[in-house]
Amino acid sequence: MKKVICRMLVVLLVWAPLHLAQAGMIGTDQLIASNAQSDRAAVLQMIGRAEVAGQLQALGLDPATAKDRVAAMSDEDVSALAGKLNSLPAGGTSSGAAAVVLIVLMVLLVWWISGNK
């Protein structure tokens, strides 16, 4: 039994590839092209969302036309737009109401704690 296992291990070691990963230098033009493609895909994906398409239609712009316009944009413009999309807050803009509510709750908590002593 040991001989069979040893022979199988030898065969597997010989059969297995000796190098699985390859490394190489990537050119600047390849990096810029891949970034531009990913930015353009992110913008097109955002336009494809139902709520964004609804807003575009409410503003009088067909989502297909918006996609055509994104396809016609330069790589720099698409990159700037994708950067703005990534920096926007997920829930929308804050008007400071959350900070006011938090301050009021803290004042009420301090007032309640000082009244119970």
Image: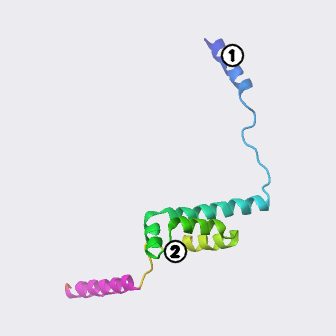
What label does residue 88 carry, if any? 2
| Of the pair 36 and 110, the residue shown nearer to us | 36
**Amino acid type of disc 2?**
Leu
| Of the pair 96 and 83, the residue shown nearer to us | 83
- Asked if the stretch drawn in magenta spans residue 50, the answer is no
Q: What is the crowding at mark 2: few (fewer than 14 residues within 10 Å), some, or many (at least 20)?
A: few
What label does residue 19 carry, if any? none
Q: Quadrant of the C terminus?
A: bottom left
Residue 44, compared with residue 16, is above or below; it is below
How far from the left and from the top, in percent, is residue 17?
Answer: 73, 31
Q: In this view, does 104 lie to the left or right of 72?
A: left
- Asked if the stretch drawn in magenta spans residue 97, the answer is yes
Q: What is the crowding at mark 1: few (fewer than 14 residues within 10 Å), some, or many (at least 20)?
A: few
Residue found 47% across the figure and 75% down from its top: 60
Q: In this view, does 57 lie to the left or right of 75?
A: left
**Amino acid type of disc 1?**
Arg
Query: What segment is highlighted magenta in the picture?
Result: 96-115
Q: Name the residue under label 1.
A: 7
